[in-house]
Amino acid sequence: MTININPGTVLPVTTSSNGQLFAAYLPEIATAGLIDEELSRAAAAAPVPGRPRNRPELDVILRKARETGMTAMSGVVLRGISSISVPIFGHAGNLLATLTIVGLESVFDNSPIGTPAQALLRAGARLSERMGALPARPACRQACSARPRATRPSARPIRCKARPRLNRRAGDRT
C-alpha cells in the first residue's frame, strides 16, 4: 500500500507529529492562533485518544517533544496511519523543517525506542548538522528544553550556553 502526502498539504498543529514539533520549537506567537482554533474545535468535539483538548494537555505533549527530540502520532489525523517526526535545525538553533515517516498503524512501530524512530533521529541529527546546527548533547537538550519559549516575534532564538556556538564570520567555535 502506498501512502502519499502531497507537498503543500496543511496538517494540524496540535494533532500531527510534524505540527507538534512546529508548536514545540517555533515562537509561541507564530502558532498561537492555529493552536487556539484547533483546541477550541477539539473541546467542542467528542474526545479522541491522542488529541489534546486544552492547553495544559498540549503543553505536556510539547514538553515531551522537546525532551525526546521527536513526536509520534497514531490514527489521529488519518485513521490507520501512524507517523514519527523529528526536527531539523539550522545554524542559529532555529527550526527549519521536520522530517517525517509514516506507515500503517497495524505494522508500523512508532514507539520512541523502535527502529524507525531511532533511524529517523539519526537522520534528523545528520541533516541538522549539514544545515549548520551543532550536535545536541543530552544534558544540553534537557537544559534548553526547560527554558521558556520566546513570545515576541522579534525575539532572537535562545542559544544554549552549555555548548559553543558557531561564529559565522570567522567560521570557528567561540
Image (spheres, helix red, strand yellow):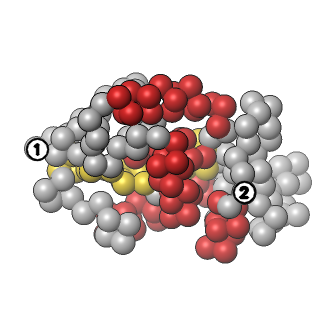
The local crowd at label 2, few if under 14, some if 14 to 19, many if 20 or more residues have their Cα within 10 Å, is few
Residue drawn at x 51%, y 64% as measured from the top left = 68
Residue 65 in the figure: left or right of residue 79: right
Q: Amino acid at mark 1?
A: Met
Q: Position of residue 125 (x, y in %)?
A: 54, 61
Q: Amino acid at mark 2?
A: Arg
Q: Which residue is mark 1?
A: 1
Q: Which mark is residue 15?
A: none
Quick check: can you spot residue 86?
no
Residue drawn at x 55%, y 56% as measured from the top left = 63
User: Disc 2 on helix, strand or loop?
Assistant: loop
Check the picture and name the quadrant holding the N terminus: top left
Which tag is nearer the camera, tag 2 or tag 1?
2
Q: Which residue is mark 2?
A: 147
Image quadrant assignment for residue 118: bottom left
Judging depth in this view, the residue of 3 and 39 nearest the camera is 39
Q: Position of residue 40 (x, y in %)?
A: 44, 28
User: Disc 1 on helix, strand or loop?
Assistant: loop
Residue drawn at x 51%, y 60% as measured from the top left = 64
**Contact (Cβ within 8 Å) of mark 2 with mark 1:** no
Check the picture and name the quadrant holding the C terminus: bottom right
Quick check: can you spot residue 71?
yes
Numbered marks: total: 2
The mark that comes first in sequence, 2 or 1, is: 1
Image quadrant assignment for residue 27: top right
Q: Compared to 173, does 62 lie above or below?
A: above
List the single residue furthest toward the bottom: 139
Residue drawn at x 77%, y 33% as measured from the top left = 152
Q: Position of residue 124 (x, y in %)?
A: 49, 56
Q: Position of residue 33 (x, y in %)?
A: 56, 25
| Inter-mark Cα distance, 2 to 1 | 42 Å
